[in-house]
Amino acid sequence: MTPLSKQTLSDYMHDALPDAELAVVEQRLRAEPDARMLLEEVRQEEERGEHSIGAIWRREHISCPNRDQLGGYLLQALDEDLLNYIGFHLKIVGCSTCQANLDDLEQRQREAAASGRTRHRKIVDSSAGVLKRLARPA
Protein backbone atom coordinates (compact mmCIF):
# COMPACT_ATOMS: atom_id res chain seq x y z
CA MET A 1 0.00 0.00 0.00
CA THR A 2 1.27 3.47 -0.89
CA PRO A 3 2.29 5.56 2.13
CA LEU A 4 0.14 8.58 2.90
CA SER A 5 1.69 11.87 1.84
CA LYS A 6 2.15 14.84 4.14
CA GLN A 7 -0.13 16.86 1.85
CA THR A 8 -2.89 14.26 2.12
CA LEU A 9 -2.61 14.28 5.90
CA SER A 10 -2.61 18.06 5.98
CA ASP A 11 -5.74 18.07 3.82
CA TYR A 12 -7.23 15.49 6.19
CA MET A 13 -6.53 17.73 9.19
CA HIS A 14 -8.20 20.67 7.45
CA ASP A 15 -11.20 18.64 6.27
CA ALA A 16 -10.23 19.31 2.68
CA LEU A 17 -10.57 15.78 1.30
CA PRO A 18 -13.51 14.33 -0.58
CA ASP A 19 -15.63 12.07 1.65
CA ALA A 20 -14.44 8.81 0.07
CA GLU A 21 -10.76 9.72 0.48
CA LEU A 22 -11.40 11.00 4.01
CA ALA A 23 -12.80 7.60 5.00
CA VAL A 24 -9.77 5.79 3.55
CA VAL A 25 -7.35 8.05 5.43
CA GLU A 26 -9.24 7.53 8.69
CA GLN A 27 -9.15 3.75 8.25
CA ARG A 28 -5.43 3.83 7.55
CA LEU A 29 -4.77 6.05 10.57
CA ARG A 30 -6.57 3.54 12.78
CA ALA A 31 -4.68 0.58 11.34
CA GLU A 32 -1.19 1.94 10.62
CA PRO A 33 1.11 3.21 13.39
CA ASP A 34 3.44 4.75 10.77
CA ALA A 35 0.56 6.81 9.37
CA ARG A 36 -0.26 8.10 12.88
CA MET A 37 3.40 9.04 13.41
CA LEU A 38 3.44 10.93 10.10
CA LEU A 39 0.19 12.69 11.05
CA GLU A 40 1.80 13.85 14.30
CA GLU A 41 4.81 15.09 12.33
CA VAL A 42 2.52 17.07 10.03
CA ARG A 43 0.71 18.55 13.04
CA GLN A 44 3.99 19.67 14.58
CA GLU A 45 5.14 21.21 11.29
CA GLU A 46 1.90 23.14 11.02
CA GLU A 47 2.17 24.35 14.60
CA ARG A 48 5.64 25.69 13.80
CA GLY A 49 4.08 27.45 10.82
CA GLU A 50 4.68 26.49 7.24
CA HIS A 51 5.24 29.58 5.14
CA SER A 52 5.41 28.23 1.60
CA ILE A 53 3.32 29.94 -1.05
CA GLY A 54 1.14 26.83 -1.35
CA ALA A 55 0.53 26.73 2.41
CA ILE A 56 -0.40 30.40 2.50
CA TRP A 57 -2.80 29.99 -0.45
CA ARG A 58 -4.49 27.00 1.22
CA ARG A 59 -4.62 28.62 4.66
CA GLU A 60 -5.96 31.96 3.41
CA HIS A 61 -8.27 30.44 0.75
CA ILE A 62 -6.77 32.72 -1.87
CA SER A 63 -8.00 30.59 -4.77
CA CYS A 64 -11.53 30.36 -3.37
CA PRO A 65 -14.33 32.31 -5.02
CA ASN A 66 -16.13 34.76 -2.77
CA ARG A 67 -19.72 34.23 -1.61
CA ASP A 68 -21.17 36.54 -4.27
CA GLN A 69 -19.39 34.54 -6.96
CA LEU A 70 -20.70 31.29 -5.46
CA GLY A 71 -24.20 32.78 -5.55
CA GLY A 72 -23.67 33.68 -9.20
CA TYR A 73 -22.48 30.12 -9.84
CA LEU A 74 -25.60 28.76 -8.19
CA LEU A 75 -27.75 30.92 -10.48
CA GLN A 76 -25.47 30.25 -13.48
CA ALA A 77 -25.22 34.04 -13.83
CA LEU A 78 -21.46 34.41 -14.38
CA ASP A 79 -19.30 34.43 -17.47
CA GLU A 80 -18.37 30.99 -18.76
CA ASP A 81 -14.72 31.11 -17.64
CA LEU A 82 -15.67 31.90 -14.05
CA LEU A 83 -18.42 29.24 -14.06
CA ASN A 84 -15.87 26.70 -15.28
CA TYR A 85 -13.30 27.73 -12.66
CA ILE A 86 -15.78 27.53 -9.79
CA GLY A 87 -17.02 24.16 -11.05
CA PHE A 88 -13.42 22.92 -11.15
CA HIS A 89 -12.74 24.34 -7.68
CA LEU A 90 -15.80 22.60 -6.21
CA LYS A 91 -15.81 19.31 -8.10
CA ILE A 92 -12.16 18.57 -8.85
CA VAL A 93 -10.29 20.39 -6.09
CA GLY A 94 -13.10 19.51 -3.68
CA CYS A 95 -12.81 22.64 -1.54
CA SER A 96 -14.89 21.87 1.54
CA THR A 97 -15.08 25.54 2.57
CA CYS A 98 -16.61 26.59 -0.74
CA GLN A 99 -18.88 23.55 -0.81
CA ALA A 100 -20.17 24.48 2.65
CA ASN A 101 -20.81 28.04 1.45
CA LEU A 102 -22.59 26.75 -1.65
CA ASP A 103 -24.70 24.36 0.45
CA ASP A 104 -25.71 27.28 2.68
CA LEU A 105 -26.63 29.42 -0.34
CA GLU A 106 -28.71 26.56 -1.79
CA GLN A 107 -30.54 26.16 1.53
CA ARG A 108 -31.27 29.89 1.69
CA GLN A 109 -32.51 29.80 -1.91
CA ARG A 110 -34.90 26.93 -1.07
CA GLU A 111 -36.15 28.79 2.02
CA ALA A 112 -36.68 32.00 0.02
CA ALA A 113 -38.56 30.10 -2.70
CA ALA A 114 -40.80 28.43 -0.10
CA SER A 115 -41.42 31.75 1.62
CA GLY A 116 -42.21 33.38 -1.74
CA ARG A 117 -44.73 30.64 -2.60
CA THR A 118 -46.41 31.05 0.80
CA ARG A 119 -46.59 34.82 0.38
CA HIS A 120 -47.94 34.44 -3.16
CA ARG A 121 -50.62 31.99 -1.95
CA LYS A 122 -51.69 34.42 0.82
CA ILE A 123 -51.97 37.28 -1.66
CA VAL A 124 -53.98 35.19 -4.12
CA ASP A 125 -56.25 33.86 -1.38
CA SER A 126 -56.89 37.30 0.12
CA SER A 127 -57.42 38.85 -3.32
CA ALA A 128 -59.86 36.14 -4.40
CA GLY A 129 -62.42 37.18 -1.80
CA VAL A 130 -62.14 40.86 -2.73
CA LEU A 131 -62.47 40.09 -6.42
CA LYS A 132 -65.56 37.92 -5.81
CA ARG A 133 -67.22 40.74 -3.88
CA LEU A 134 -66.37 43.24 -6.61
CA ALA A 135 -67.66 40.90 -9.31
CA ARG A 136 -71.11 40.55 -7.68
CA PRO A 137 -73.72 42.92 -9.00
CA ALA A 138 -74.69 45.57 -6.51
Image: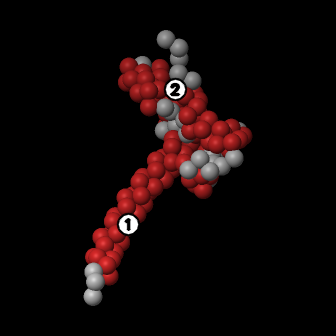
Q: Residue at x 52, y 26 (%)?
A: 38
Disc 2 element: helix
Picture coordinates of residue 79 (x, y %)? 69, 47
Residue 29 sits in which quadrant? Answer: top left
Above or below, comparing residue 124 to residue 54 in the picture: below
Q: In this rendering, would 83 be left or right of 42? A: right
Looking at the image, can residue 58 be seen? no
> Could you tell me if the residues under marks 2 and 1 are in contact, i.e. CB atoms within 8 Å?
no
Mark 1 residue crowding within 10 angstroms, few (<14) / some (14–19) / many (20+): few
Q: Where does label 2 land, which residue?
A: 38
Picture coordinates of residue 110 (x, y %)? 41, 54
Looking at the image, can residue 100 be seen? yes
Q: Residue at x 59, y 34 (%)?
A: 93
Disc 1 element: helix
Which label was assigned to residue 120?
1
Q: Nearer the viewer, residue 6 or 15?
A: 15
Q: Residue at x 42, y 58 (%)?
A: 113
Q: Amino acid at mark 2?
A: Leu
Above or below, comparing residue 19 to residue 116 in the picture: above
Q: Nearer the viewer, residue 124 or 4?
A: 124
